[in-house]
Image (tube, coloured by chain):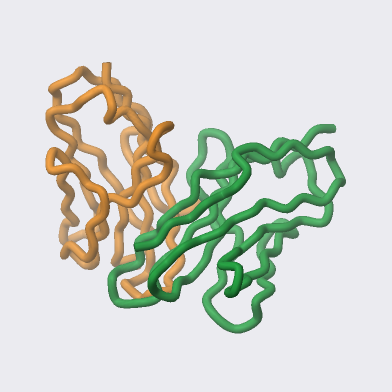
Chain colours: A orange, B green
């Protein structure tokens, strides 16, 4: 158990819908990262937050957005869902934004878009 | 920008045999290097990391990796595998600068240990 929790574990929805994925980092960790794992794209970095502020952005679609709240939990919002958004979404956290901080991964949320 | 190539998508091996999982990377800046393991229906767990210093890095579960700067490689090895090592292994890099800690992953190698 990494100490990072993600809810829900599974999510099934339809095209065009909007969903919210939630992540609680390990106690004391200030940085949160979101990654997408899909069969065709592999594991891709989406976005990083540090202490409530966006720190780095990767291949995140404009239909996707994220935020980190004062209690440091984070939410990833996916809207206008398409079939190709079906994937495993991982959250990871690290102690701070130091360059060599180990990232601890949650168990993931499996999103299926029908 | 960085990229990571894992040359083998699947590696079948018999129990107690040695194994090497290959990883090559490309980057315009210096990087930190990582190996993660993903067991079925679980998240990723860090096996080992190279930040600086000795190029031979030892990790958990008897794994080790060697950083070769001239060949831009970071191959993972284990002298004797167990059935429980069956999993997906990911090589990853993170830029050694102030651009954030994001990890760039390779495509993964599925290690299949047979009895």
Q: Position of residue A56 (x, y in %)?
A: 24, 62
Which residue is depicted at the point 19% across and 56% down? A68
Position in image of residue B37 (x %, y %):
58, 49
Q: Which residue is drawn at 87% across and 46% down?
A: B16
**Viewer-nearest residue: A92 or A59:** A59
Q: Where is residue B54 in the image (x, y as percent from the top left)?
A: 65, 81
Query: In terms of image quadrants, where is residue B102?
Result: bottom left
Q: In which quarter of the image is the C terminus of chain B?
A: top right
Residue nearest the viewer, comparing B85 with B11: B11
Counting labels gives 0
Q: Quadrant of the N terminus of chain B?
A: bottom left
Q: Quadrant of residue B108?
A: top right
Q: Measuring 29% from the left and 76% from the top, which residue is drawn there? A: B98
What residue appears at the point 41 percent right and 45 percent down from the top-left corner?
A43
Q: In this view, does A7 lie to the left or right of B44?
A: left
The image shows residue B13, relative to residue B52, as above or below, that is: above
Left or right position of B92 against B115: left
Q: In this view, does B39 lie above or below B35?
A: above
- In the rendered view, would you say A49 is above or below B19? below
Residue placed most toward the observer, A21 or B53:
B53
Given the current orientation, which residue lies at the most extreme front position?
B70
Q: Where is residue A28 in the image (x, y as percent from the top left)?
A: 35, 67
Is A63 in front, or is B69? B69
């Amino acid at each position: 158990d990494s100490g990072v929790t993600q809810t829900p574990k599974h999510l099934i929805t339809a095209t065009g819908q909007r969903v919210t994925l939630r992540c609680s980092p390990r106690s004391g960790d200030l940085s949160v990262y979101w990654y997408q794992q899909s069969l065709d794209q592999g594991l891709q970095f989406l976005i990083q937050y540090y202490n409530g502020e966006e720190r780095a952005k990767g291949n995140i679609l404009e239909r996707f957005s994220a935020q980190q709240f004062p209690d440091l939990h984070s939410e990833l919002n996916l809207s206008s869902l398409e079939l190709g958004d079906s994937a495993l979404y991982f959250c990871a956290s690290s102690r701070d934004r130091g360059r060599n901080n180990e990232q601890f991964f949650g168990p993931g949320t499996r999103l299926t878009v029908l | 920008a960085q990229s990571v190539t894992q040359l083998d998508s699947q590696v079948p091996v018999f129990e107690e045999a040695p194994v090497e999982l290959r990883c090559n990377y490309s980057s315009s800046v210096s990087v930190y290097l990582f190996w993660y393991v993903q067991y079925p229906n679980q998240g990723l767990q860090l096996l080992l990391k190279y930040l600086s210093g000795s190029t031979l890095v030892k990790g958990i579960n008897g794994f080790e990796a060697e950083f070769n700067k001239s060949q831009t490689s970071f191959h993972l090895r284990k002298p004797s595998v167990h059935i429980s090592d069956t999993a997906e292994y990911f090589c990853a890099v993170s830029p050694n600068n102030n651009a954030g800690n994001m990890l760039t992953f390779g495509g993964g190698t599925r290690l299949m240990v047979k009895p």
